[in-house]
Amino acid sequence: MDKIFDAIIVGAGQAGPSLAGRLTAAGKTVAIVERHLFGGTCVNTGCTPTKTLIASAEVAHQMRRAGDFGMRIRGDLSIDMPAVKARMDAVVSNSRNGLEKWLRGMRGCSVYSGHARFESPHELRIEDSLISAEWIFLNVGGRALVPAMPGIDRVPYLTNSSMLELETLPRHLLIVGGSYVGLEFGQMYRRFGSDVTVIEKGSRLLAREDEDIATEIHRVLESEGIGFRTGAECIRLSSRPPDIVVEVDCESGDREVAGSHVLLAVGRRPNTDDLGLEVAGIAVDAHGYISVDEELRTNVPGVWALGDCNGRGAFTHTAYNDFEIVAANLLDGERRGVSDRIACYGLFTDPPLGRAGLTEAEARARGRQVRIGKRPMTRVGRAVEKGETNGLMKIIVDAETQAILGAAILGVGGDEAVHGILDTMSARAPYTALRRTMHIHPTVSELIPTVLGELNP
């Protein structure tokens, strides 16, 4: 045995480093193991790089719209993709390097670089080192799912990770998957200047969202020139140089779409298949996610799973909240659980979608009697003033208890404005508390009390 620690953290994603900070501050000795890049998905291939690219694409879009605001730009807009990528790389590098420097300088924390595998329930081997601890926390994240669709082994394809390595602009980007990752990349590259076609197996985009929200997002993206093929059963890939061909079986339209690049955006899978979990006796579900209870404990005493690998959330904020739950329970004497939190997330297209709680469809499926408040962004002063009137606001209220059940704000500032609703839900206050609150004018949030005052069955 090389060394014994109080705790071992496998993975330096969103939950791991903060947990290391709390544990070492409490006097624990900690080993944190990272086999590749510090910061996990969010910093390296997720939120940080994609939102940096989205910001560049937004500037390009606004420059093309300059005439709408009374301005004239001489000459054609030119996109310097190597410069765009260099800006993204700098933002990512600063974040990743800062995190690694913090961990390596953390008193009581030993950093191991390499791949960790279990040799027993509380022993891990990293290359030539064997370490053990009473507490082990798995924060190993996930990666893009590559489905076994026909022809996938005969054509080059991109995932959300390899997409970030491009320094040239795709002539025609084909995106398989009409959900969050696919739509963000689709709008981004359309604004950079690529032709874009999104191919979705389902009958519509964003199956998780209410149909009115998904329909509006479809309309907005289509108005920017993105093509869509929904109901695409039996997707097949083939090569017809210089193009890649995606064959589809849709109810209407051509039976194939040809493009220069293909991005697979059809889901994620956990990084749990090469950790030796079976040696430790740690249970996983049918999809490879580590099974955990309310407090994120696995079936093996003294072993927890946090972040994307536990199947209890697929976002940076859920991973960070996993850390908060574990730290509160172990170090602060609290009893917190995953079910305490309210589901929330964003879709960072333009306009963005901020989501909290249940959709209307989910609320009705649970037998709730609901009242709905809706307002198009064309009736929001801030949106009109900014010339960004796409989208709508929607709030779902329980007709009996007056509790806010959920909300979707699709529109300028929607990803920020939704937090006022989320906070009210967390405080378990009735919708009337927010309805009677005075908000600042002119903002998007000021219309939330108005929407709540216009609830309909």
Image: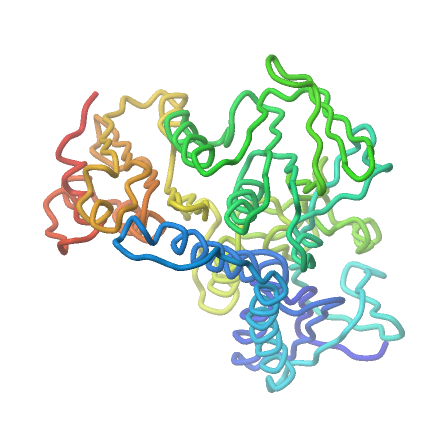
Q: Position of residue 362 (x, y in %)?
A: 41, 27
- At a point 75% along the width and 35% down the height, the residue shown is 147
**How many numbered marks does the figure carry?**
0
Q: How are the residues colored?
A: rainbow
- At a point 22% along the width and 33% down the height, the residue shown is 375
**Looking at the image, which residue sits at the far front?**
75
Q: Quadrant of the C terminus?
A: top left
Q: Quadrant of the N terminus?
A: bottom right
Side of 441 relative to 240 (left or right): left
Pick the residue in front: 229 or 98. Answer: 229
Q: Quadrant of residue 230?
A: top right
Pick the residue in front: 79 or 404. Answer: 79
Q: Position of residue 280 (x, y in %)?
A: 80, 54
Q: Quadrant of residue 287?
A: top right
Regarding residue 69, the answer to whether it shows in the image is yes
Q: Position of residue 159 (x, y in %)?
A: 69, 47
Q: Quadrant of residue 306?
A: bottom right
Pick the residue in front: 34 or 81. Answer: 81
Side of 141 relative to 52 (left or right): right
Regarding residue 322, the answer to whether it shows in the image is no
**Looking at the image, which residue sits at the far top?**
251
Is 322 located above or below residue 425 in the figure? below
Q: Position of residue 183 (x, y in %)?
A: 53, 40
- At a point 57% along the width and 59% down the height, the residue shown is 42
- At a point 80% along the width and 65% down the height, the residue shown is 115
